[in-house]
Amino acid sequence: MSALAAAVERVWPGRDALSEILGGGITNHNLKVEVGGEVFVLRVTGKDTHQLGIDRSVELEATRAAAALEIGPEVVAFVEPEEWLVTRFVEGDTPPVERMREPEMLARVAAALRAFHHGPPLAGSFDSFRVVESYRGAALARGGTIPRAYDKAHGLATQIERTRGGDAAKPCHNDLLNANFLWNDERLYIVDWEYAGMGDPFFDLANFSINHELDEDARGDLLEAYFGEIRPEQTRGLELMRYMSDFREAMWGVVQTAVSELDFDFAAYASEHFARLERTAAEPAFRAALAA
């Protein structure tokens, strides 16, 4: 019996369960499981994911909060001590990136994020400025190598941090890749809440923006949908945190090269995001935001 088949048997012992692997994840194994006429998703956590700053109890808390807001799947079970998460399967597809850039979808994304940001506080925290430093330490502790681009990026991050202090932390998702959205022609769902924590809402807005390659006009549409208006300080916050989104993603790739056993080129992933953050730093909008 394979490890994943054993996991299904662990959760549904003696049941006639049919399972298939769901694609898209590069940290965990996700399975679609049909049993007793119902359909679930079983998340089997990857090795040493605590090194990535993941707290599974906070993930559970955030997933339940999202479900209560009807923007996330229903939590069915939390399997201990393995810390596997079982949610009800949500019918829907991941929209094309181009679809997510349309004003209608930007409005739905903004509404979902705003609702979660104003929801109940979470027990965990997410500070992108500390996360990149933590990832550096975790990679070194496991024998990993830190790219030369880190020092320059960290220096610029320090400048950005000086402009972002003072705002109250709010519940955030912090991993708004396109693969973490589902659309069923009626409702937009956000899945994969494992990096959720109390943080800067502008990180969420920027994370979505950079991962969907929104141009300046689309970024303005997102801000207007979220706030109802666009103020200069909001534009600055979004522009600056786009840089931090890629810095976090780059260092996530660095630490994954040292800890992950999944068949994925994490070194190339890190290099891609270091290259993109350098392009962001060269953009006039970013330079103007930093100077202001």
Image (cartoon, helix red, strand yellow):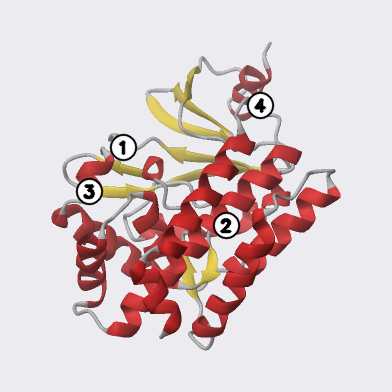
Sequence-first tag of 1 and 3: 1
Q: Are marks 2 and 3 in contact (CB under 8 Å)?
A: no
Query: Dot 1 corresponds to which residue?
Result: 94
Q: If the image is split into quadrants, where does the N terminus sit?
A: top right
Looking at the picture, how far across and down is residue 121, in whole percent?
A: 51, 73
Q: Residues within 10 Å of mark 1 (few under 14, many from 20)?
A: some
**Disc 3: which residue:** 187
Q: Residue at x 24, y 48 (%)?
A: 100
**Cβ–Cβ below 8 Å for labels 3 and 4?**
no
- Using residue 255 as the reference point, say whether residue 245 is left or right of it: left
Question: Circle 4 sits in a helix, a strand or a loop, which is it?
Answer: helix
Q: Nearer the viewer, mark 2 or mark 1?
A: 2
The disc at residue 248 is 2
Please tell me whether mark 1 sits on a helix, a strand or a loop: loop
Give me the residue at 15% from left, 57% from top.
103
Residue 198 in the image, given as x and y percentages of width and height: 54, 71
Does residue 247 appear left or right of residue 32 in this picture? Answer: right
Camera-side residue of 211 and 185:
211
The residue that disc 4 covers is 10
- Residue type, mark 1 in image: Thr
Residue 195 in sight from this viewpoint: no
The earlier-in-sequence mark between 4 and 1 is 4
Foreground tag (4 vs 1):
1
Secondary element type, mark 3: loop
For marks 2 and 3 on the same chain, the one whose residue lies earlier in the sequence: 3
Classify residue 138 as left or right of residue 202.
right
